[in-house]
């Protein structure tokens, strides 16, 4: 039996019109809700995960896990308060776990090419007085040397989270969040020479 | 006295108590210095937010593949109890049966060794090694042995098929035939799952031409990754987005290529936690 023989039989099988009647289980309300939240937060979450230096592949997997966990969370009737904060918190924890695993497996040979790619251009065009790209790189460079919790605060804020949500994601107090941001902003402003 | 940076930030996010918020508002209305500082901080956050996005957005792959994968995984969560999948055929239903299988396999090997002594043992190990190497090389079946086989079926039947109907185990004799065909010694049969090439949910049948030993050891393109593809194709067929015959042809010809095509990716978007839990359920 050759592949074409066995498949040839199949060609007569489907018949038009059978499709609608056959459409099986409609996605439940929870599935729909999870998919909507996925549309809304996949990019912000992936950016957030990538900023920890995990690969895109790992980031995507983390996000899949986040939304499957969200589905189970909603399905079991748990609290729906501040789902955005919940989603980011799970993503944050999974990302840290992933990075920890990566660090262990890399064991010293940790040259992160994704970070290398984000380094400022070593030969800026001298004619361009502080192009927007240069300024962007300078801001990012300042942030990269901040304490990790400070970086997270800024990045979560950049993804639109309120301070209260950031506090919940990172497991710190509201005061600690505002203090961290105050500190980071002072540095950014100084570096920016404003 | 001026308002601190910290209070300015909290005020902007509506986190000050009503009384204090009113005081800060009144102060801001009168104090140019504090207004400028607040604007500077908010402007800096906005600039950073822009820089943050611009630096990372280029790395984000299109959402289509991940969206399809999540939909497939959600469907799996909804449609089956976690441990059992209708696509899995060769799975020991109880520890007793698993133990019995291992026991029988062990006795068989021992008997063989007694008869053939060292010579047979030697060739058996060599055979095993090459089979394992082959399994690492190919997550796809040998097409001459497993071209795929389907039955006459309407889409309606495929889409309304209760999962229990297709969960029936492949008979022991057929299983042995498949292993024999692929030259796998029984002592290592546990490293493989007898899987349908064309899943029953896509009209595939329990026929030696549609069954192959899929190695658990394949790291990248594993049986679990193929499950995701089957789910995805099943959904697309039942939603009228894909011809059943096309789905059958593509999964039979090169399921890895089909996965790449329908998930818009070059690498499996597998789920570690899901895999781990499934592996555990299998070991248990």
Image: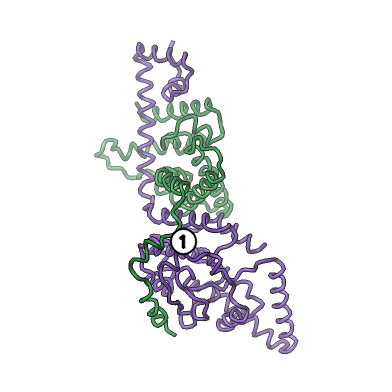
Q: Which residue is drawn at 38% across and 52% down?
A: B63
Task: Name the outermost residue toward the left.
Answer: A127
Residue A5 pos. (x, y %)? 40, 83
Residue assigned mark 1: B268
Residue B219 pos. (x, y %)? 54, 65
Which of the 4 quarters of the picture holds residue B29? top left
Task: Name the outermost residue toward the front.
Answer: A21
Nearest the camera: B95 or B133? B95
Shown colour of chain B: purple
Tell me, by letter, which chain the rendering colours green: A
Residue B74 drawn above or below residue B177: above
Task: Please name the colour scheme applied to the rendered image.
Answer: by chain
Relative to B151, is B246 on the left or the right? left
Residue A181 pos. (x, y %)? 46, 29
Chain of the residue on which disc 1 is drawn:
B
The crowding category of the residue bearing disc 1, from other C-alpha atoms within 10 Å (few below 14, some 14 to 19, many at least 20), is many
Q: Is mark 1 on a helix, strand or loop?
A: loop
Residue B180 drawn above or below residue A75: below
Q: Which residue is drawn at 46% across and 78% down?
A: B149
Q: Can residue B234 be seen in this view?
A: yes
Nearest the camera: B155 or A152? B155
């Amino acid at each position: 039996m050759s592949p074409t023989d066995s498949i040839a039989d199949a060609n007569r099988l489907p018949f038009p019109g059978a499709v609608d009647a056959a459409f099986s289980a409609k996605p439940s309300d929870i599935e729909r809700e999870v998919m909507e939240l996925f549309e809304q937060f996949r990019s912000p979450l992936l950016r957030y995960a990538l900023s920890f230096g995990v690969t895109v592949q790992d980031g995507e997997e983390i996000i899949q896990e986040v939304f499957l966990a969200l589905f189970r969370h909603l399905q079991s009737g748990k609290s729906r308060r501040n789902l955005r904060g919940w989603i980011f918190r799970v993503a944050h924890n999974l990302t840290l776990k992933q990075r920890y695993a990566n660090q262990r497996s890399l064991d010293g040979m940790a040259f992160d090419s994704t970070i290398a790619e984000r380094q400022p251009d070593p030969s800026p065009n001298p004619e361009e007085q502080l192009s927007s790209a240069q300024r962007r790189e300078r801001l990012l460079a300042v942030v990269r040397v901040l304490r990790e919790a400070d970086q997270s605060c800024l990045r979560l804020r950049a993804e639109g989270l309120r301070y209260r949500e950031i506090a919940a994601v990172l497991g710190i107090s509201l005061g600690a969040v505002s203090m961290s941001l105050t500190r980071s902003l002072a540095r950014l402003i100084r570096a920016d020479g404003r | 006295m001026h308002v601190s940076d910290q209070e300015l930030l909290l005020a902007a996010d509506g986190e000050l108590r009503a009384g204090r918020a009113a005081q800060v508002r009144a102060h801001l209305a009168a104090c140019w210095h504090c207004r400028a500082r607040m604007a500077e901080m908010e402007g800096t956050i906005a600039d950073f937010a822009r820089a943050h996005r611009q630096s990372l957005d280029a790395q984000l792959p299109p959402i289509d593949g991940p969206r399809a994968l999540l939909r497939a995984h959600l469907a799996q969560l909804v449609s089956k109890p976690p441990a059992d999948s209708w696509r899995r055929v060769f799975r020991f239903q109880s520890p007793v049966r698993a133990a019995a299988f291992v026991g029988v396999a062990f006795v068989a090997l021992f008997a063989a060794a007694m008869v053939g002594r060292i010579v047979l043992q030697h060739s058996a190990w060599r055979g095993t090694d090459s089979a394992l190497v082959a399994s690492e090389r190919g997550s796809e079946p040998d097409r001459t042995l497993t071209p795929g086989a389907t039955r006459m079926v309407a889409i309606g039947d495929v889409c309304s098929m209760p999962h229990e109907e297709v969960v029936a185990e492949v008979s022991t004799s057929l299983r042995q035939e498949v292993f024999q065909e692929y030259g796998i010694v029984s002592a290592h049969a546990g490293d493989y799952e007898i899987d349908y090439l064309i899943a029953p949910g896509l009209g595939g049948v329990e026929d030696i031409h549609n069954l192959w030993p899929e190695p658990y050891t394949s790291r990248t393109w594993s049986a679990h990754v193929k499950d995701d593809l089957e789910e995805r194709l099943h959904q697309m067929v039942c939603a009228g987005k894909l011809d059943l015959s096309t789905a059958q042809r593509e999964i039979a010809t090169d399921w890895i290529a089909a996965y790449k095509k329908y998930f818009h990716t070059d690498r499996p978007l597998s789920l570690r936690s899901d895999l781990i839990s499934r592996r555990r359920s299998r070991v248990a």
